[in-house]
């Protein structure tokens, strides 16, 4: 490695820190410049009867897509429209009940300048996010959020860096301000993210995973140990409930069987009542699967008997069911 390249590599961390410091400073500038226009924007968006439409081109378009996604996932329905596509038909997706957030740091994007007057003629409200409050876009918009930064992190001053970071952060600020105003909760978040880990934990219930009917392993107290082994093996839950006239009186697990095998060589005349564990752990069918996991962990068990609202057992849930559903 030549000395010049080695020196440049050694400076990379310094350069990286410089970029992060410049961008962090830009965020503080935006924070310090927030005024009543931000509150007005929030009030407009909270009163929106339609959806929040975000539009921008180039780097502003990439940032706009992320802002739209964040709004949608935090309780403010939104979609992104590319301004060039909007001028060729996609503007038909926007109604006068929607609010458009138009993003352009210069405020002079010709594509936005073309569609904004059309939106205004249709009585669609427009909020501009721009670094130039004296721009064409700012003049056309109903409300302007200024997002001006003093320096780009790019040493050439060419690539949008600090400005795009600041715009993204301002979009996040809007989304979270709306989230708080709406009282948006973890459960609300889970409903729009059913495939995510949080969604699974907050939406999946025991009834979605439990084994019922013929899949529910159960025997009577007078069943012999061989019957218990067959039931446990065939139902593949590592346990069987012990039921006396539909009343839960015990449970036999793989562990109970191993302890029996260690104590005696002969299984003749051994009944379920002789080896079952009393007072098995139960959970109601309408409980969250995450609650079932907590009960299992706190009780150091791998299976639960599932009951209905009246406490009647009618199913079972195993740790592997939770693992398969990715509740862990």
Image: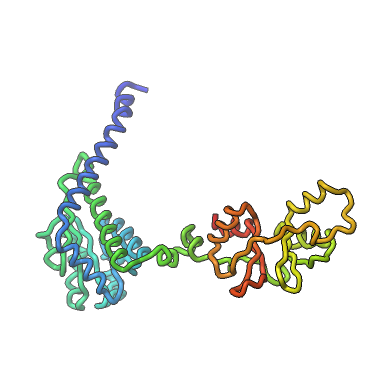
Of 56 and 230, which appears nearest the observer?
230
Residue 114 coordinates in the image, percent (x, y): 19, 68
Q: In this view, does 224 lie above or below 151?
A: below
Residue extending farthest to the top is 3
Of 190 and 6, which appears nearest the observer?
190
Residue 229 coordinates in the image, percent (x, y): 80, 58
Which residue occupies 58% across, 58% down?
Answer: 295
Which residue occupies 73% across, 56% down?
Answer: 253
Quarter of the rendering containing residue 70: bottom left
Residue 222 vs residue 43: left or right?
Answer: right
Quarter of the rendering containing residue 218: bottom right
Q: Quadrant of the N terminus?
A: top left
Residue 78 visible? The answer is no
Residue 283 vs residue 214: left or right?
Answer: left
Of 215 and 221, which appears nearest the observer?
221
Of 187 and 7, which appears nearest the observer?
187
Quarter of the rendering containing residue 24: top left
Residue 112 vs residue 92: left or right?
Answer: left
Residue extending farthest to the left is 134
Residue 88 coordinates in the image, percent (x, y): 28, 71
């Amino acid at each position: 490695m030549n000395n010049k390249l080695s020196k440049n590599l050694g400076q990379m961390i310094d350069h990286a820190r410089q970029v992060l410091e410049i961008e962090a400073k830009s965020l503080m500038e935006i924070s310090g410049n927030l005024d009543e226009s931000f509150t007005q924007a929030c009030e407009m968006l909270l009163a929106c009867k339609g959806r929040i439409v975000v539009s921008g081109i180039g780097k502003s378009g990439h940032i706009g897509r992320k802002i739209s996604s964040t709004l949608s996932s935090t309780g403010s329905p939104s979609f992104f429209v590319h301004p060039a596509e909007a001028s060729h038909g996609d503007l038909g997706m926007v109604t006068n009940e929607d609010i458009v957030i138009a993003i352009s740091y210069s405020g002079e994007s010709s594509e936005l300048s073309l569609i904004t007057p059309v939106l205004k003629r249709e009585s669609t409200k427009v909020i501009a996010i721009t670094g130039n409050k004296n721009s064409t876009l700012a003049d056309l918009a109903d409300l302007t959020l200024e997002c001006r930064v003093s320096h780009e992190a790019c040493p050439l001053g060419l690539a949008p860096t600090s400005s795009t970071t600041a715009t993204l952060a301002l979009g996040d600020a809007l989304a979270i301000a709306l989230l708080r105003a709406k009282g948006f909760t973890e459960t609300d978040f889970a409903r729009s993210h059913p495939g995510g880990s949080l969604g699974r934990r907050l939406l999946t219930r025991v009834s979605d995973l439990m084994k019922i009917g013929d899949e529910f392993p159960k025997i009577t107290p007078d069943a012999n140990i061989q019957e218990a082994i067959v039931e446990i093996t065939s139902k593949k839950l590592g346990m069987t409930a012990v039921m006396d006239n539909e009343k839960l009186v015990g449970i036999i697990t793989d562990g109970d069987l191993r302890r029996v095998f260690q104590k005696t060589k002969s299984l003749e005349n051994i009944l379920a009542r002789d080896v079952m564990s009393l007072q098995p752990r139960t959970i109601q069918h309408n409980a969250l699967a995450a609650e079932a996991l907590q009960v299992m962990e706190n009780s150091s068990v791998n299976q639960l008997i599932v009951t209905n609202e009246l406490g009647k057992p009618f199913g079972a849930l195993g740790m592997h069911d939770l693992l398969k559903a990715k509740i862990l």
